[in-house]
Image (cartoon, rainbow, N blue to C red):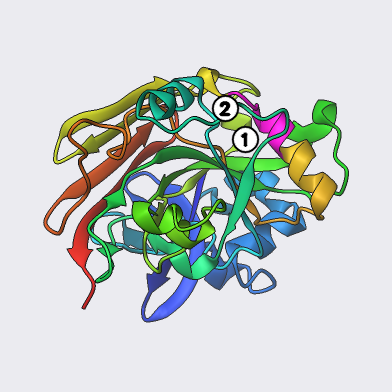
Amino acid sequence: MKLLSFVLDGRETWGAVVGDGVVDLGRRIPACATLADYIGSGRYLQAAKDVEGLAADAPLAGLAYLPVIPRPEKIVCAVRNYMDHHQEVLAAGMHRELSEEPPIFLRVWRSQVAHGRPIVRPHVSETLDWEGELAVIIGKAGRNIPEAKAYEHVAGYSIYNDGSIREWQFHAKQIASGKNFEDTGGFGPWMVTADEIAPGRELKLETRLNGEVVQHSHTGHMIFSVPRLIAYASTIFTLVPGDVIITGTPAGVGWSRKPQRFMKPGDVCEVEIEGIGTLVNPIVAQD
């Protein structure tokens, strides 16, 4: 089942994809004001029953998408979590050793932007880079989750473009400043519930800029697996339904290229992940 957040008739709501349209479950299940509420209730496990026999309330074409989880409590992002990306960073002259534990940082929800909405290049930089990534949506709260039980806490999977303002990322040893500019992180178009993607399945990932393939890899190249990321993050803080874990990007980012290449106004960036779909964002300059 594909679940998503969107705007319909001037109000934020959420629902499920049915054929070429969406069913507005936010209107039909008032006890769950948001998709995160629905996930937290556990009712999402029977989403197929909730939409059974219902006609779509709106077509997907022209739908005003929201980020899949518009205001997650936490967006936990993994750094250098693909071996091919680590190797290209080394080749580009940044000498960093692999860590024994997953390096992570946090994004704020205002840095997110929905499928179809523009990623914004800020006034202060021309180094807006793409990073196609698999997103994991937490379905069940937990602290100190063991790796062996981590998949029990996964509600589903989505797509993220972890847009990065590169020189701000390198202002200090921590990189969060370059990862949190408003409207730079594409998230969508929907989440696919975990029952549709087998635990540990290797998913092809491809990023395209103006139709040109700039990243082509698969999730099997991750250094730290999804269960490892969940276990590590949950040791620090309680993961709650609707939290998002962004699992890192493969090789092919613009910063590592010679010459370097970045997204600019007028470009269109697409991230496609097997079994999930395609996230599309045009690029614009900050007003």
Q: How many marks?
A: 2
Task: Tell me what residue is drawn at x 31 percent, y 47 percent.
Answer: 129
For the magenta stretch, what is the residue range?
A: 223-229
Disc 1 marks a residue whose amino acid type is: Ala
Numbered label attached to residue 197: 2
Image quarter for residue 279? top left
Residue 84 visible to the viewer: yes
Residue 58 part of the magenta segment: no
How far across and down, in percent of the image, does residue 244 sit? 61, 51
Task: Tell me what residue is drawn at x 64 percent, y 61 percent.
Answer: 36
Disc 2 marks a residue whose amino acid type is: Ile
**Residue hosting label 1:** 194
How far across and down, in percent of the image, does residue 180 sit? 47, 63
Location of residue 133 with respect to 123 vertically, above or below: above
Q: Quadrant of the C terminus?
A: bottom left
SS assignment at label 2: loop
